[in-house]
Amino acid sequence: MEIIDAQVHLNQLTPDWKTAPHDEVLATGVQAMDAVGIDKVLIGEAQGFSPKMLPVGEELPNGAVRTTYPFSERAVQLHPDRFIYHVRVDSRDPELDRILSEVHSHPGAHSIRIVPVPQTGEVARLERGEYDALFAAAERHRVPVFAWVPGRAHLLEPYVKKFPKLQFIVDHCGVGVAPLRMGELPVTMATSLTPTLSERVAELGRVCELARYANIAIKWCHAPGLLSEEEYPYRDLMPLLRKVIDAFGVERIMWASDYTVARDQNGNSWAQCLYYILDSTELTDSEKEWLLGGSLRRALDWSS
């Protein structure tokens, strides 16, 4: 069975990631993937929880940031059979159509991701409908959109209806941030906090209501930290996952570990993030194949 992790900030894998050469971090990443049994990874290149939550890049005169992906590009260059990545496109970029038209021209770039946080005004802009131009360009150029909208998945609904040919993927189960088990909650995450498990489970139910739209999928990511009160193998997750499967169909649910964050916030190992699904007796082999790679390939129209 091919296993694809749909989100890892792989450039942050090692303790010295801010200064270590990319090739060294990549070598460690490949070693870890082989040890855990992961064939491919979708890289979310990020620089931590900065106020703007953006990777490095050029700031344009209007304040928009045009990002670059040196780590991801190097990963794809060295291991084209193992890595793809998503890009971040600022909704205020004055050249949205050109930027979106060029996404697929970069080897390994299959999608974009939005991370609107209240501090930047992006959540308010999303709510006001000001992402139309970005999503229209993404739809024209067939570029799927991952969206981190913790507890705010309902804000996507007008866009999902307006752009029916655009593939949306709701990140991190669509629920709010949970209190951390380790470390201190960054400010950019604190404004997305949903304090109790019961509230987050209710949010998951509202995300399931969006399943009636065929162009929306869900990333089953951070579930151990967001939706479980148990230790590995997180048996209390399976009834919730079954509820999501019943709503979306397993073909629209993709697994991700977000390992580089999950280990720091909740103490989950990469293997634990994977094997509670891979070893589950409550999922069929076919369901595991969809969850662990097939659904991501389908959503991104990724065949290579």
Image (cartoon, rainbow, N blue to C red):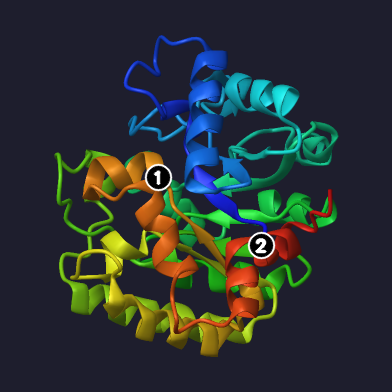
- The residue under label 1 is 259
Report x, y in % for residue 161.
67, 76
Q: Residues within 10 Å of mark 1 (few under 14, many from 20)?
A: many
**Which residue sits at x=62%, y=28%?**
72
Report x, y in % for residue 174.
42, 66
Question: Foreground residue, 90 or 274?
Answer: 274
Q: Nearer the viewer, mark 2 or mark 1?
A: 2
Q: Amino acid at mark 2?
A: Met
**Which residue sits at x=77%, y=41%?**
100
Label 1 sits on a secondary structure element that is helix
Report x, y in % for residue 191.
24, 51
Label 2 sits on a secondary structure element that is loop
Q: Amino acid at mark 1?
A: Tyr
Question: Foreground residue, 8 or 125?
Answer: 8
In this rendering, the answer to whether 223 lies above or below 130 is below
Report x, y in % for residue 231.
20, 65
Question: Foreground residue, 100 or 272?
Answer: 272
In this rendering, the answer to whether 51 lies above or below 234 is above
Q: Which quadrant would residue 119 be assigned to in this image?
A: top left
Is 241 on the left or on the right of 51, as rendered? right
Answer with mark 2 or mark 1, whichever residue precedes in sequence.
2
Classify the position of the N terminus by image quarter.
bottom right
The residues bearing labels 2 and 1 have C-alpha atoms spaced at a distance of 20 Å
**Which residue sits at x=57%, y=82%?**
284
Q: Residues within 10 Å of mark 2 (few under 14, many from 20)?
A: few
Q: Which mark identifies residue 1?
A: 2
Q: Does residue 176 appear in the picture of this structure? A: no
Q: Which mark identifies residue 49?
A: none
Is 189 on the left or on the right of 36, as rendered? left
In this rendering, the answer to whether 109 lies above or below 204 is above
